[in-house]
Image (cartoon, coloured by chain):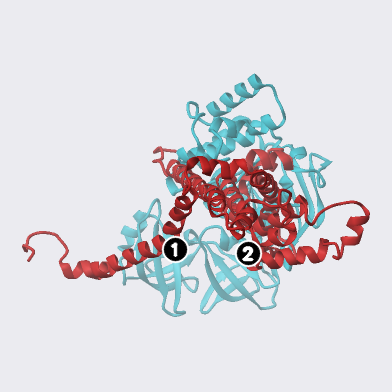
Chain colours: A cyan, B red
Amino acid sequence: MSITVNHITKRFGKFVALDDVSLEVPNGQLTALLGPSGSGKTTLLRIIAGLESPDTGTIKHHDEDVTDRSPKDRNVGFVFQHYALFRHMSVFDNVAFGMQIRRLPKDQIRDRVMELLRLVRLEGLERRRPAQLSGGQRQRVALARALAVQPKVLLLDEPFGALDAKVRQELRQWLRRLHDEIHLTSVFVTHDQEEAFEVADRVVVMRAGRIEQEGSPQEVFEQPATPFVMDFLGQVNVFHGRVEGGRAMIGNLVLAYPEYAAAESRPAAVYVRPHELELAESPDGTSSVRARVLHINPTGAMTRVQLLAEEFDFMIHVDTNHERCSELQLKPGSHVYIVPKRLRVFLPDYSI
Amino acid sequence: MQPENRLVPTTRHRHAQSDPPLVKWTLILLAILVVGLLVIVPLVNVFYLAFADGPVAYWNNLFGDAETRHAIYLTLIVAPVAVLLNIVFGVLAAWLITRFQFPGRILLTTLIDLPFAVSPVVVGLCFMLLFGLQGYFGLWLREHHIKIVFAWPALVLVTAFVTFPFVARELVPVMEALGPDEEIAAVSLGANGWQVFWRVTVPNIKWGLLYGIILCNARAMGEFGAVHVVSGHISGQTDTMPLRVEKLFQEYKNPASFALASLLTSLALVTLFIKIWLQRQTQHDLAEAAKPIDEGV
């Protein structure tokens, strides 16, 4: 079931949590609300759930206006960051809670609970109390509990925030596989970009109560609409310079930038990702920067090199592969030339 | 002195971490002395004097005298009713304070402690000023034939007021610590207000609530000052146990007075034991929660 968010505004006293937010959540897809703390993502999720009511605007579930409906009548499943399991009930009673409230027959409840526990791989633990489970197990119980009442939409509020790194990784993949199995429209909130990219079909980047950009992970990463989006997603180097007649100029560095063809010279912020910078032994005309290697971090698939552009007294991060590093015989103190391969320019007041 | 190769802290190091034995034992003996003199000796004395004429006289003093019997009966009605009222109000107040934000919330929290700060006699006096025969509502009450002062309703109301903080104060920190998450989860699963309260809130607060009830009851049964003012001291009608003890004592009927006092004291001891048992239960719950967790996702 698709969700339509229309011009939602929400204030808490003087603080504006959501400022005229509109959004379409497609049916059957896993959408991530991604942003820093205070961006309004959790508030938006709770408004979709019916746990908060907006000051203005409407929420539609598949063309049905549900703005004034209680959470019970909206048929949503909600998973909390800190699980919020009922501590005095067993795992079985936790999962059965929603069905017991609706007074479903006992054997129907029993069948469904066991089916769900099998789905979340927790069969055999139904007599346990939440206190006797690990964090990952608790979160899976919370998920089973939310799914028990057969919601049309699943909402998750930073579901893996309270778990440690390894467990988080495993549960992420597990959630993705679960979604592929049941294809339930899902929205989840996270501040972890990696998590959003790994799990979601669509990513909605939020900041200060507004939506900065939405799209597939690839879209928002490769074509960021605003400096914030580019900065928030992954690493980025920022330079301040000018654009004029098809070129971007940062100090003595002149780079081709055909996207800005006007003759008028304007100040600009130039954003370059670490892997969009190349390292070379010799200069490439005016489109390279001489820098000294400060630190080499051979972590993971790429080697991260920290350099100091002495001319600007500026730190630059470059991601390159291990082979290139050995080719250039990089070590702290050596000098190389940095060649930008691809850049994105943001002009104050509007972006290109 | 210590051999060099033993890993034992030297006497000097031990002193740095704890008080010297002299100080420790002096303080312990002092505490025992205070508790002994001010608490244990008078309590033992109560029982000693109660049984001064023998166990048969003890029994007759308690249950042979009609007015004393009535006093026991009255206390056994007034106290539980007051406690019941306070359970309702206490839970309501705790719920309001911990789950909602509203103007005057801090004021309400402070007002809950008011009965502790006010002398019970003053409470009784204010009550008389409001509901007494010459009081603010006195005329209205008389016209409608409603008896409040010098009758059991006054006793209940005044006892409830004086013991109000016990339940609320016990519940507020418990509910603050629990947080609203479980209740919100229940709402998101479709539960209405009542269902959330009975299925989620009450099981979580039951030990704190029980503790508050025990304290409230103990205080209610022993309430003297406020009840003294509003009851009119009508023997056989409006005397509760504490009032009866005082009356017997004034009439120099010491064994009787102490017999009834020993009953109140026994109640205090029972309260103490229930409190210890309850604390054991909460410890047990905490221990359960701290049990080792399964490895793995």
Q: Amino acid at mark 1?
A: Leu
The mark found on residue A211 in the picture is: none
**Rendered location of residue A37, percent (x, y):** 60, 60
Q: Residue at x 74, y 39 (%)?
A: A72
Identify the mark at residue B116; answer none if there is no mark.
Answer: 2
Q: Quadrant of the C terminus of chain A?
A: bottom right
Gap in angstroms between the C-alphas marked 2 and 1:
22 Å
Measured from the top left, where is residue B234 in percent x and y? 73, 54
Mark number, residue B38: 1
Q: Earlier in the sequence, mark 2 or mark 1?
A: 1
Q: Nearer the viewer, mark 2 or mark 1?
A: 1
| A73 over A39 or under it: above or below | above
- Name the residue nearer the viewer: B38 or A71: B38
Please tell me whether mark 2 sits on a helix, a strand or a loop: helix
Q: Judge whether A90 appears above or below B218 on screen.
A: above
Q: Residue furthest top?
A: A107
